[in-house]
Amino acid sequence: MPTLTDLVRDHTELNETDLEWLHALVSDWQLLADLSFADLLLWVPLRSAEALPAEVGVRPRPAADSPVPGWVAVAQMRPTTGPTAYPEDLVGKIVRTGRRGLIDVAWRERRIVREGDPEWGSGIPVREESIPVRRGAKLLGVIQRSTNLSSARTPSRLELTYLQSASDLAQMISEGRFPVPGEEPNLLRSPRVGDGLIRIDRTGRVTYASPNAQSAYRRLGLATDLVGESLGTVTASMCDTGEPMEEALSAILSGRAPREVEVESNGSIMQLRTIPLVVGGARIGAIVLVRDVTELRWRDRELMTKDATIREIHHRVKNNLQTVAALLRLQARRLRIPEGRAALDEAVRRVGSIAIVHETLSLTPDELIDFDDITDRVIMMAGEVSTPETRVTPKRTGSFGVLPAEIATPLAMALTELLQNALEHGLPAHRDGTLEVLAHRSEEGGEPRLVVTVADDGVGLPADFDVESSNSLGLQIVRTLIVGELGGILDFHGRPGGGTEVVVNIPLTAHKRPGPPR
């Protein structure tokens, strides 16, 4: 399905600034749909040269009668507070001028146009209104507001307040005052109309509070009704903790500026969003949306505590592994048997590669790791512990990207083994050589995969080499980690100009751990 951006760029003459305004409007117009109990459809005029679809029985209108050739629907919103008037998706629909009369009038006369009698075209009564969308002095499009009247009844005080607030917002849209220019994006999961709505006058006093909003303030500790009270003063008095934010609550909740704020009192946490109502250049008050986010915030705090605990665990594991590596080094220095010292040095290297991963995990807020940094450190470590006679500096080409911890840990250890194996056995001593780690991502059968190649220009593989029957502990570890634990593919082969290439191909989706190969 085409996006709003696609439709505007493909069919209209609006510029990028206009597009940003429409994005800001559409990101927040659920508020208008819910307050109106109505569907919203945003129509934008087609560019002059746009080819229009042929309509049977419809003759094209002369250019003199048509300010624009036609309209394209670029966005649609249905209400959560009432039945929809258009269950079908209308985004992308193109119509000629004259087929949507109210839209043409609203555009031409730059005013809100309301239909007196409901339409029955779809078998249900629908009241139509058209709201011009303005940015400064420029008209960008028209909102078609369609109300399903099939369940019409005598409106309650809540519904009348909703409708009056919707009318004020519609007027602000037609005057270019909503969305508010320069307003920062809303907080994640911003309050909605059904969560709780408070209407305040220009002095900041409450003229109406929905039952949900009143209940929210009851949980904050308010024993009386909100109506007639100064919302900022009441809220600040309940949340008086001496912090600077409480001192500014009265100003925030007076309705002078669009703001979102969270308040906490009596064990409850409330999210408040203030939307000033400015009609005809005069501030007439504001609507304040209220949402109880107590459970969400406590859950967030629990997750933050768990994340901090996990990072601390990774930090302690790293410290313990480094202690083990230090003890192994001390033991290696005391050995007089070369084979034993070499075995302990290998153990130090393996423990070190795992410690690097845990150190990185201790610094990240989640279990995702920038593996390029891990690779560079593993390469540096391999170069440091290689024999002095080997004049080779390994390097990395390409990017691994971000990897989850369950892939990063075994992959780091496998890379350590492959690099050390190349330095010790593949590259001859007393000469310069190259050792390179190449990484890139690909897709095979729609599955994302990571392909890593460890290449050297050394002596190459023995004629009878077989990784599955090799007695090398390092290669057995690599095969177990790549094939068994990560479900990947491991391939050793010679290079045309001499040397060896080891290709590791692992899936990046959730791993089915089949266990070590037999």
Image: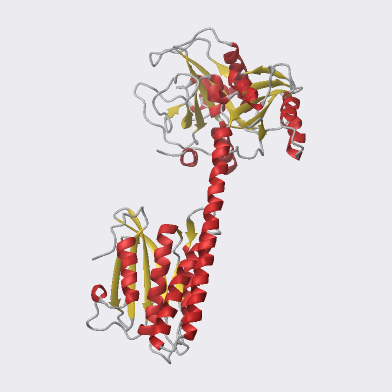
Residue at 43% x, 67% y is 412
Please indicate whether residue 241 sits to the left or right of residue 22 in the image: right
Q: Is residue 14 visible?
A: no
Q: Is residue 117 visible?
A: yes
Residue 455 rendering spot, x and y as whole percentages? 37, 77
Taking the image as shown, residue 403 lies to the left or right of residue 179, namely left
Quadrant position of residue 299: top right
Which image quadrant: the N terminus?
Answer: top left
> Residue shown at 37%/75% (left/top)?
418
Between 356 and 213, the one lying in front of the other is 356
| Placement of 293 over or under 114, stated as above or below | below
Look at 34% across and 65% down and name the residue there: 481
Q: Quadrant of residue 496?
A: bottom left
Depth check, front residue: 263 or 370: 263
Find residue 164 and report its image quarter.
top right
In percent of width and height, residue 479 lies at 31, 69
Q: Nearer the viewer, residue 122 or 407?
A: 407
Please state the horizontal and vertical placement of residue 367, each as a whole percent of the image: 48, 55
Relative image position of residue 189 (x, y in whole percent):
55, 35
In-front residue for pair 453/209: 209
